[in-house]
Image (cartoon, helix red, strand yellow):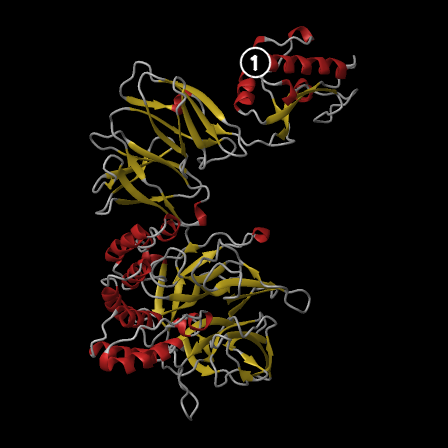
Amino acid sequence: MLQRIIISVLLALSVVCTMAQGNADPYVNEADRYYAQMAYARAIPPYTTATELGAVNEHVTKRLAECHMRLGQTEEAEKWYAMVVKFLNREPVDLFHYAEALKSNGKYQVAEEWMDRYLAEVEKGEAVLHRSNIGGFARKFTADPDRFTVRNVAANSSFSDFGTAWADENHILFSSARKVNVGIERRASYNDQPFLDLFVADVTPSGDLVNARELEGDVNTKLHEGPATASANGDVIWFTRNELFNGRVKKSTSGILRLGIYKAHNVSGKWGNIEQFLYNNSETSVGHPAISPDGMRLFFVSDMPGGHGGSDIYVCKDMGGSWGEPENLGPAVNTPHNEVFPFIGADNTLYFASNGHPGLGGLDIFASIYKGLDGYAAPVNVGAPVNGPKDDFAFIINKDRKKGFFSSNRPGGLGDDDIYAFEMLGDLEQRFLCTGLVIDDETESPVVDIEVKLFDMDGRVVATARTDANGEYNVPVDKGKEYLLKVEMKGRYTGETHVSTEDIAEQQIITRDIHMIPDAGIWIRGTAHYQEKIGFVPGVTVTVVNMSSFFTESQTTGEGGDINMRLQSNEEFEVLLEKPGYYSISLPISTIGMKNGIILLNDLRQLDFEPILIGTPVPFKQIRWAHEGTDLDQAAKIELDQFAERLNTNPLVKVEIGVHSDARDTNDPAKRDQKRAASIVSHLVKKGVKKDRLTEKGYGISRLKNHCAPGVQCTEAEHAENRRVEFTVTDVFE
């Protein structure tokens, strides 16, 4: 399994030793020593013997489960985790690991049940991280496995073969544990396989790999040599090796043998002139190098401090002969778990493996589009059959984006890890999923076997689903859309929530729970929208004030921007919607004469949230002047009344009222505009706006918006563009 060269050396584990009883003690002690050295393959036999002697306790069974899981022996791991979760003193994370083992064995439904148990015992934030990481996702992303053809390559051996990289269009570099040299066979304590060396193989016209042979020169040593990358002309390779200092192996202070990156040059067909990477460090690991097509960026994996957890992907930029400081690719790519085996395609797309993003098993392969200065977009799971329940990693693709290779420890291969060739029959499609629970708010229990309908904003049903035994639904959604989810149940008002997929690429999965509220009583419903873009507004504080008792009640909108609040009958209310950085909205509500029913806020007023933009002029639409004077006409007063309401609802906002003329007016327009601005301010003050929040300014023709200066021939429409009234937010009171 691939962890023998990454996770095993990237992460140091503390040892908590719980002694077995009786004759099992010596075996437990021996196994614990191997475990502390990350020699998992060697730890398994004494742990197993200890269980046969009666030491079937939490410590031993958990260690056995972990050892098997780290070696990719997921069936055995599942067996031991099934015992671990039955102990009274087990931890919530044990439930999670059991679910992960089940998922790695393709038992998605059972895995989902154990994940639900885990989610019930952990904090909400952590639950969100792992929710829908199993069943719904797996069902969606295995539904269309025909986008790839996948086959095992001829160059595989009975040992571990993995980590392909292009040496050139016709040759592939890879790592292998196969024994080639005659002599004492060196075996890694981690998995009891021979140490890894670098090999090269030929690519056939059909896309197979043949004629595998060891790299010549000084690259391969008595240590591990792992994943590599080659320069565009093939004269230089960067590769992973166990860390050396002054030519000798050096462990970290915690006793871990770390990884480093090394550079080798092709000298007459042999690899030599070995150089260390600038950022090698005995206390942290750096490995899995990947060079960009232009040779200007070197990507790698590290567990250096300051990352997001586990192993992260970093990049160094060529600074003219030396590599700049490592830069973390950030939370869009990196997670609290492990991101490994980066590869940069000809179009600069980043491909990598991760067990932190929602996937089908252990490690899954993801693609992230390069956005220039904005870095990399949120990754897309490439789906089945490249990804599956086991570990899938080390994905590379040719310049035509049609053929390539990846590595996997899936069943049916020749060895531990095998290399697989693939052909992509279509583009990588961005597939997205909306999932969640249908919950009965009265009983606080999930609703099973009920139909969920997904509507577009034109009211058309675009997808349906039924909730499963856990009350969960899954419906496919498209990026950049707005939807409404509805559920109908007798004795309950229609449950609904809104979904916006404007930013769904950040996670591929959106979670929305649908709450069924009792059909008794009076409820207000609404949905907060953005004014300037699609999508619904989360984080809006909705405050309802009873105008007779002044009792207040508040809630905050979720990602769907939805409002659901219960009101008393025969009362008057004021509803205030507030979000920092946006204009607040206020509207009156009356339940006089009502006993039951729903009041739809959006039918009473548009709940469109407009951002407060300091220093940006915003035009009034209906401001007109009677007889070219300074008196406001009726349409202007109506618009200003609405503006006064906005200012009174947002009492911290200060504004300037600016009046402008067109260039045809030469009779001191600035003086007249000043009087017009003053009349607007006077009207706003009469409507309750405090004078110290308002500034009037007549600009005349000093700020023309177009080319229509005095003496220039322009159309009436062009002159009208300059003849305007604007308000500008100048400040917001603290």
User: The N terminus lies in which quarter of the figure?
Assistant: bottom left
Residue 289, x across and y down, in percent: 53, 69
Q: Nearer the viewer, residue 362 or 81?
A: 81
Looking at the image, residue 513 lies above or below residue 129: above
Corner quadrant of residue 410:
bottom left
User: The C terminus lies in which quarter of the figure?
Assistant: top right
Residue 704, x across and y down, in percent: 72, 25
Q: Nearer the viewer, residue 226 or 554?
A: 554
- Residue 190 in view, yes or no: yes
Residue 84, x across and y down, in percent: 26, 65
- Residue 607 in view, yes or no: no
Q: Is residue 8 left or right of residue 683?
A: left
Corner quadrant of residue 603:
top left
Disc 1 secondary structure class: loop
Q: Is residue 111 left or right of residue 202?
A: left
Q: Is residue 439 left or right of residue 153?
A: left
Residue of label 1: 687
Residue at the limit of the structure toward the top, as seen here: 627
Mark 1 belongs to which amino acid?
Answer: Lys
Q: What residue sits 73% from the left and 25% below the top?
A: 703
Q: What residue sits 40% from the left and 38% below the top?
A: 558
Q: How many marks?
A: 1
Disc 1 residue crowd, few under 14, some 14–19, many 20+, Cα 10 Å: some
Q: Nearer the viewer, residue 192 or 623?
A: 192
Q: Is residue 56 left or right of residue 11?
A: left
Residue 718, x across and y down, in percent: 68, 22
Looking at the image, residue 631 lies above or below residue 359: above
Corner quadrant of residue 535:
top left
Q: Nearer the viewer, residue 239 or 303?
A: 303
